[in-house]
């Protein structure tokens, strides 16, 4: 019985490597998305705290310099919030793109694996036929000898 050799084994190995790379890229994209969301959340908290401080400073003694500083800081935080929102959207888009690429890589690998399984089944059937022929020859030889 000879060994089974799949002629597309090298391509299948390449597809497996490609899938592993895509899995890592997808994981990195998910981590980036998580980081950007956390950063946006921190900015939201800072913005809320800043607004609360601003309200408190207005209700107390009105000092124009203090109010102006607070307004400038709040405008800065609002700009950072907008920027963080854009970064989160970009990270979400990148994550979705990486997910699609991973799915494609998985499909490509699965196609070759299914083909290999079919070829292996054909190989097994052929080996069974050869084995049955050998058995038939032995049986007919022993029958003719007796």
Image: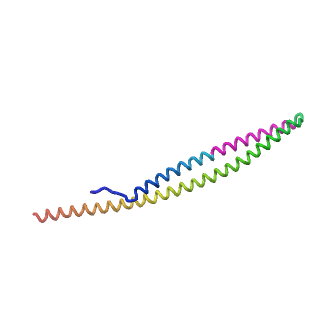
Residue 14 point in image, percent of width and height: 45, 54
Q: Looking at the image, which residue sits at the far left?
A: 146
In the picture, residue 125 is in which quadrant?
bottom left
**In the visual, does 55 lie left or right of 43?**
right
Check if residue 143 falls in the magenta segment.
no
Q: Is residue 57 rendered magenta in the image?
A: yes
Where residue 140 appears, as percent x and y from the top left, is 16, 65
Horizontal side, residue 134 vs residue 146: left or right: right
Residue 72, compared with residue 139, is above or below; it is above
The answer to whether residue 10 is left or right of residue 126 is: right
Q: Residue at x 43, y 53 (%)?
A: 13
Toward the viewer: 53 or 144?
53
**Residue 9 image offset from top left, x and y in percent:** 40, 56
Identified at 46% across, 57% down, the residue is 110
> Which quadrant would the N terminus be assigned to in this image?
bottom left
Residue at the extreme top of the image, as rendered: 61
Quarter of the image for residue 134 reads bottom left
Tell me what residue is drawn at x 25 percent, y 60 percent. Answer: 131
Residue 36 quadrant? top right
Q: Which residues are magenta?
A: 34-58
Magenta stretch mostly in which secondary structure? helix
- The colour scheme used to paint the residues is rainbow
Decide if residue 19 is on the left or right side of residue 131: right
Q: Indicate the position of residue 6 as horizontal and vertical percent values.
A: 37, 58
């Amino acid at each position: 019985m000879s060994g089974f050799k799949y002629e597309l084994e090298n391509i299948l190995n390449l597809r497996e490597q490609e899938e592993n790379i895509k899995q890592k890229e997808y994981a990195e994209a998910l981590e980036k998305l998580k980081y950007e969301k956390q950063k946006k959340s921190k900015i939201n908290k800072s913005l809320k705290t800043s607004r609360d401080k601003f309200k408190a400073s207005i209700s107390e003694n009105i000092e124009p310099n203090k109010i102006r500083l607070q307004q400038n800081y709040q405008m800065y935080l609002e700009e950072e919030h907008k920027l963080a929102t854009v970064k989160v959207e970009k990270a979400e888009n990148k994550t979705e793109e990486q997910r699609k690429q991973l799915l494609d890589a998985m499909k490509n690998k699965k196609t070759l694996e299914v083909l290999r399984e079919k070829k292996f089944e054909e190989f097994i059937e052929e080996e069974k036929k050869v084995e049955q022929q050998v058995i038939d020859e032995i049986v007919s030889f022993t029958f003719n000898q007796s």
